[in-house]
Amino acid sequence: MDQATPPAGNGSMIKVSVWRSTGPGGVAAGEGRFEAFDVPRQPSQTVLDVVTHIQRHLDPTLTYRFACRVGVCGSCAMVVNGEARWTCRTHVDKVSQDGTLEISPLRNLPVIRDLATDMSEFFDKWARARGQFTGTRTRKDDFAVVSPLSAERQQVDLGIECIGCGVCYSSCDVVEWKPDYLGPAAMNRAWTLVNDTRDQAQRERLAAVAGDAGCHACHTHMTCTERCPKHLPLTSAIAGLKRVTTRALLKGEL
Amino acid sequence: MNARTQAWLWFAQRASAALLGFFVLVHLATMIYAVRSGLSAGEILSRTRGNTPWMLFYAMFVVAVAVHVPIGLRNILAETFAWRGRGLEVAVLAIGVFFLLFGLRAVWAVYAPGAGAL
């Protein structure tokens, strides 16, 4: 905790700079400026609490997105003091610097307005990475048996808790350099399906995640893994895709 | 260029990197040994001329460089300057051919028994 961060309660305030769009709604992408607000400190205050206070008490036109407030829905990610974070589970105590917060929208995504980004491309890339389960069984068939102890199922367990918040996508340098790059979350989803023994679209999936827009463009910076609020091993998932696609390539199956 | 070819490029760059790791270590060790022993250029040439294992080692070194460098350069140019497409492919291929030809020419000059001064 920063020494200069004001303690909660006792009427102390925190200085907050919030990104505000200045362009017309819907096309505000790069246009905007930071606006300063003073927000009362509260015990166990989260960054989402701060943003909510601003909208409810200081400026009702502030636009942002949230839903569950408990780290499940993945809606409220923003860039806080330079790093993408889930704001509902980020305490002000942990991230404020000299008693200040700077809050801006996620990087690498178009801004709709203020702190709300357009997540369409982020989720379209999940589809492009063949993130859909493709099974063969019908309702007449019995359940597939997948041992929880199998190596494949354990790989799935490592990556299945993604909440789709976009923190990894916002933090990835390769996404910034290559706008068509699928990004860590989409490839983590693909990796969980590569390890799903019931799935029947493996060849198509490996073709979808190979190449310059896929796993082979990852530089293993590991920022996604470091910043993922769910602590998923995203870089390992991408490395797994590199291994499997290379094996397929050498067998002539890619 | 399709994803399959891009995956081959990635594989070729990793494989050439593994070879280069070995080649560079042997090269540096040999250089340091040669300098510490006080060998003159003439004495070095007397050891390299007609030395086929030495020639094969450095010829493979040159080939690994000619494979590795253009692929890495292609990534850097695409990511830093957003240069994509046929122009980029031709440019980095030309750089690869340049390294290959001039590298092999240098190896031949040090290996060939009757080659002139470098």
Image (tube, coloured by chain):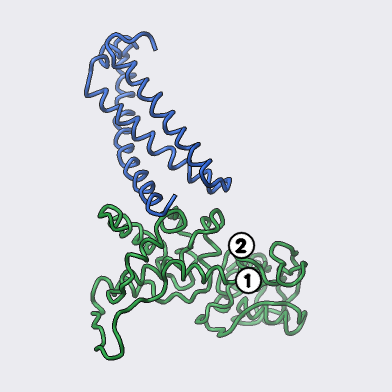
Chain colours: A green, B blue
Quadrant containing the C terminus of chain A in the rendered view:
bottom left
Which residue is under mark 2? A82
Query: Mark 2 vs mark 1: which is more N-terminal?
Result: 2
> Real-space Cα distance between discs 2 and 1?
16 Å
Quadrant containing the N terminus of chain A in the rendered view:
bottom right
Q: Residue at x 35, y 57 (%)?
A: A242
Please tell me in which quadrant of the rendered image residue A45 appears.
Answer: bottom right
Please tell me in which quadrant of the rendered image residue A162 appears.
Answer: bottom left
The chain carrying label 1 is A
Q: How many marks overall? A: 2
Q: Is residue A237 above or below residue B111?
A: below
Between A229 and A174, the residue placed more toward the observer is A174
The chain carrying label 2 is A
* Residue A186 % position (x, y): 45, 68
Q: Residue at x 27, y 11 (%)?
A: B113
Please tell me in which quadrant of the rendered image residue A133 appears.
Answer: bottom left
Q: Is A170 left, or right, of A190 in this rendering?
A: right
Which residue is under mark 1? A117
- Looking at numbered disc 2 in the image, what kind of residue is underneath it? Gly
Q: Secondary structure at mark 1?
A: strand
